[in-house]
Amino acid sequence: MSNEGSQGAPNTTTITGSTINAPVTTGSGNTVSMQNGGAQPAPTVTPDELAALRAALTALKAQVEAQVVAAQRPVALDHVKELTETLTSPQPDVSTVGYIKKWFAKNAPGLAGAVTSVIVHPVVGKVVAAAGDALVAKFKDLVEE
């Protein structure tokens, strides 16, 4: 970087290099003001996206009705209902989702993949992202289990 000029005269500044990662000020009597871009707006879920998520949950319910043994079907259907309520709410409950995922893995392992595919549905990602970074981190941990 070179700075040419004398006091009271205009400055000419030349900066060379591949990357500048900080503000640069030259001359005298300068005031530096920085403004960050601010937080990104939370993603919004459109009615069509919410309908797609509801359709995936309805498909999961149909699979439960067709594949879960009669003795466990009522509990499995209750879990699908709970999953529907929490995943379509503005603040999904991670502990409920985790419990349901584990229940299916233990009691209806043939549907564990179907449950997981609903949990990782792209619209669920948007719902979780809209709820905030803390929930995103919890969901990430849940999905990686």
Image (cartoon, helix red, strand yellow):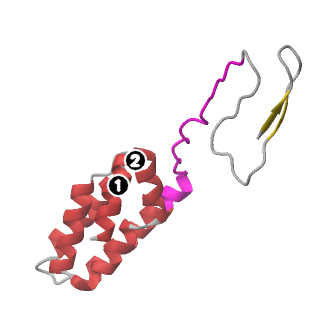
Q: Position of residue 61 (x, y in %)?
A: 32, 72
Q: Residue at x 22, y 58 (%)?
A: 96
Q: Residue at x 88, y 21 (%)?
A: 10
Q: Relative to 36, is 11 above or below? A: above
Give the position of the N terminus as an image quadrant.
Answer: top right
* Kind of element beneath mark 2: helix
Q: Which mark is residue 133?
A: 2
Q: Is residue 33 magenta?
A: yes
Left or right of 98 in this view: 51: right
Task: Give the residue type at disc 1.
Answer: Ala
Q: Is residue 77 magenta?
A: no
Boundaries of the magenta span: 30-51
Q: Position of residue 98 (x, y in %)?
A: 23, 63
Which residue of the protein is positioned furthest toward the front in this rendering? Answer: 6
Q: Which residue is mark 1?
A: 137
Task: Give the residue type at disc 2.
Answer: Asp
Q: Relative to 120, is 139 above or below? A: above
User: Do labels 1 and 2 touch, CB within 8 Å?
Assistant: yes
Dominant secondary structure, magenta: loop
